[in-house]
Amino acid sequence: MAGLLYVYSRTSIRAAKRNAQLHREADGGQISWQNENLRRHGVLKPPSSDKTLVAELVGEAKQQIKGDEKIKARATTSKEKD
């Protein structure tokens, strides 16, 4: 149960950060509360991303795995040199 709560909290935090970043980019680098209000009331189109949250999470997981493999490869090559 704790593992499920951990995964849910990490996913929701990551989604919130991604959403805030998309809104900052749509507003030119800083969140405009007026534009945010217009988006929430349907006047402005919400910023969209080509990737879904699941696709981004899978992509990030693959990058982390590749990074871990690179670290392990460096560790084994440094041990072989000794």
Image (cartoon, helix red, strand yellow):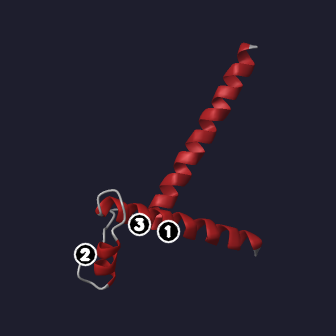
Q: Nearer the viewer, residue 20 or 66?
A: 20
Amino acid under label 3? Thr
Q: Is residue 62 above or below residue 54?
A: above
Looking at the image, the residue that sits furthest to the top is 82
Residue depth check, mark 3 versus mark 1: number of the one nearer the observer: 1
Q: CA distance from mark 3 to mark 1?
A: 13 Å
Residue 16: mark in rendering? 1
Element on which disc 1 rests? helix
Residue highlighted by disc 2: 45
Please tell me which of labels 1 and 2 falls first in the chain: 1
- Disc 3: CA contacts within 10 A as few (<14), some (14-19) or many (>=20): few
Give how far across and how far down residue 3 sits, in percent: 73, 69
Please report the residue visible at 27 percent of the width from the left and 84 percent of the height from the top.
Answer: 42
Please report the residue visible at 76 percent of the width from the left and 72 percent of the height from the top.
Answer: 2
Give how far across and how far down residue 58 sits, in percent: 51, 58
Labels 2 & 3 near each other (Cβ < 8 A): no
Element on which disc 3 rests? loop
- Disc 1: CA contacts within 10 A as few (<14), some (14-19) or many (>=20): few
Labels 1 & 2 near each other (Cβ < 8 A): no
Element on which disc 2 rests? loop
Q: CA distance from mark 2 to mark 3?
A: 17 Å
Give left or right: position of 5 versus 60: right
Give how far across and how far down residue 40 sits, in percent: 34, 82
Quarter in which the N terminus is drawn: bottom right
Amino acid under label 1? Ala
Please tell me which of labels 2 and 3 falls first in the chain: 2
Residue highlighted by disc 3: 52
Q: Is residue 8 above or below residue 75?
A: below
- Disc 2: CA contacts within 10 A as few (<14), some (14-19) or many (>=20): few
